[in-house]
Amino acid sequence: MDMNKFEMDELLRARMRDASAHVPDGVWERIAAQREGRRHLPFGWAGFSVLVLVTAIFSVWATVSSPLQIQSPPLHDNSNALQDQAVANPSAPASTSEILSHSASDDASIEKVNASPASPSFDGSNAANPAKNISNTKRFKETSSSTAPTTVNKGSQSASESQVSLLSISGSDQAAHLTAAENTTESLFTQELQSQTQLSLLQLKSVRSMSGIAMDSWSPVLFSPGISKKRSSPDCYSFNTMIRGLSMDVFFSPEYAARQLVYKEPDLINYASLRKNTESYAFAYSAGLRLSAHFQGGLALRTGVVFTDIVEKLRFKDPNAEVNRIIHLAIDTVKIGNDIIIKYDTLSIVEYGTHEIVRYNNYRFYDIPLMLGYEFDAGRWIVHINTGLMVNVATARRGNMLDPTSNLVSIDSGDPDSYKAFRSKVGTSLLMSLGANYALTPKFHLLVEPQIRLWTRPVNLRDYPVDQKYRNFGLALGFRQYF
Amino acid sequence: MTEKELIEGCLRRKTHYEKALFDRFSGKMMAVCHRYASDEMDAEDILQEGFIKVFDHLHSFRHEGSLEGWIRRIIVTTALKHIRRQKITQPLNDAEDFKESAELPDAIHHMSEQELIRVIGGLPAGYRMIFNLYVIEGYRHNEIAEMLNIEEGTSRSQLVKARKWLQEKLLSISRLSVL
């Protein structure tokens, strides 16, 4: 029969269109197993990603809207120097201005303070050189014209707010006074400068005392990211990246450890079921010590050591248990003199029956947390959101489980003959938490921190037929000590 | 269970809906896999990998064509990737000159679908891909060239050779059956 290629194609296409083939057993089970293993992961990664994103957004926001910042150490030193210099050498106003201009933050309001020249009572030189003062005034005016008017914020209790208020007072007053000075006679100008300098001296004393407070008793509740949205001048260096302080957390966290057993081959579903049926969650906890470095803007980096213990209960009824009993039977009694000698026969009896075994298995993890946190204060509370990794450095186990042949085996990490199913290190896990501190004293806080920990890798070895993974949900309770 | 219910159930990640979808289409898709795979194990692997992709990407099914056609395209794409991974493609530019026969192999009418699948599956890998894509799936040469990253002319020549190979094979089967 003749046919062209198109007819053959059509014929084959028609025959193949609805062709069906036998699907071997086990394909669906493999697909289901593979999907089951992947099913839970996206939730963890999605949650982790959201937390990282939120933390990053907070960080960026805090950095962009960083408050009017005065670092305690340089301000303290310079205000000391300034006051000493003012007292010892009242005729040295130029250097006073320089000291202030480098000690304070690079904000425009600081520049206003700097721009105020010396008091006429201080000097003869500057008073005799009004051109220089006017030049400073002009410079100030140019700067202040692009700056929003600041508000007086008297009566603020916190040191940082007080610092801001002081500078704000000086800025606004000087803006008014110096602008007026530029347009009035020299005598008026001199009076204004005198009052300015007196004000500045008062401020400097206050600033010094404030900075003393800040140095001596740094409190984490002193900052607020939203005080000012002024941008730093590129002319002055920034202290944004400097560490504001350190703290140490000590915590204990009761936890719920959700275990996931995923069989790798369909044939192993029975073994996975056997383990699920014989092992159950008993309790879990973690405890640790965490050091935090607190940065300007609310960021915190944390590390430390964390110990986690997951305890599971193994309850297994062995229907074919054998018990060896040694029985001593008295078979004869011999009396020799006053002594009685009893002769025994020893029998070994094997008893068969059902034996219920109950064990508590421990899975212990030693980890180093590497976390990024963002903190913000709310009165006596500090709320923080944290995310990061837990790097496992060691694991240990104790207990028993059933192996794939349903035999009870030891999983003790210290036992050389134990069943080799588990890793000595399980890599990294993801940790997310949302915590709150309550300030009992400025340096001592109570800590409450709900947290979720997701293991990215199973705790078992690769060739073990069932993947054993955990997700822990805990509530860390403890305290935080600031240094 | 309607197709829409199946899809919605799968999107809600209900295992029994996923199983129902697998049961409904796995037979036909296994036939597709056999046409591309070199052996039974490969066919199973392609089917498994393909259905996992189907479940993973079911949300992107737009109901514009049939679900079966959509699944078939995923299985075919998976098969091509699988073959590429195994690097079992034949050298495609063969200098041998094939002349197509106009003779109809009788066997094509008498053979069962399974036997035909087996014959097509017996084609050398390079021929097999192009023959399947062009003749059975209905792709054009330019599409095949793009999919396999080859010249369009190569696709044409490989198809001619595949047809020739297949005709000879079917003819030999026809002769054997007559004897």
Image (cartoon, coloured by chain):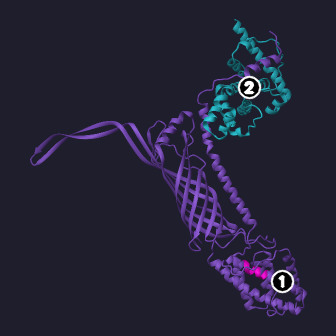
Chain colours: A purple, B cyan
Disc 2 marks a residue whose amino acid type is Ala
Taking the magenta stretch, the answer to whether it contains residue A28 is no
User: Dot 2 corresponds to which residue?
Assistant: B125
Above-or-below relation of B176 to A139: above
Is A127 on the left-hand or right-hand side of B175? right
User: Dot 1 corresponds to which residue?
Assistant: A176
In this rendering, do the residues under marks 1 and 2 share a single chain? Answer: no
Q: CA distance from mark 1 to mark 2?
A: 88 Å
Question: Mark 2 and mark 1 in contact (Cβ < 8 Å)?
Answer: no
At mark 1, the secondary structure is: helix
Q: Residue at x 69, y 16 (%)?
A: B112
Residue A262 in picture, x, y percent from top left: 56, 41
Is A111 on the left-hand or right-hand side of A437? right
Query: Please, which chain is the residue tagged with disc 2 on?
Result: B
Q: Residue at x 67, y 31 (%)?
A: B47
* Image quadrant in which you'd find residue A251: bottom right
Q: Residues within 10 Å of mark 1 (few under 14, many from 20)?
A: few
Q: Which residues are magenta?
A: A164-171
Taking the magenta stretch, the answer to whether it contains residue A167 is yes
Instruction: For the N terminus of chain A, give its image quadrant.
Output: top right
Residue A64 in picture, x, y percent from top left: 76, 66
Query: Please, which chain is the residue tagged with disc 1 on?
Result: A
Above-or-below relation of A199 to B56: below
Instruction: For the C terminus of chain A, give its image quadrant.
Output: bottom right
Residue A39 visible in the snapshot: yes
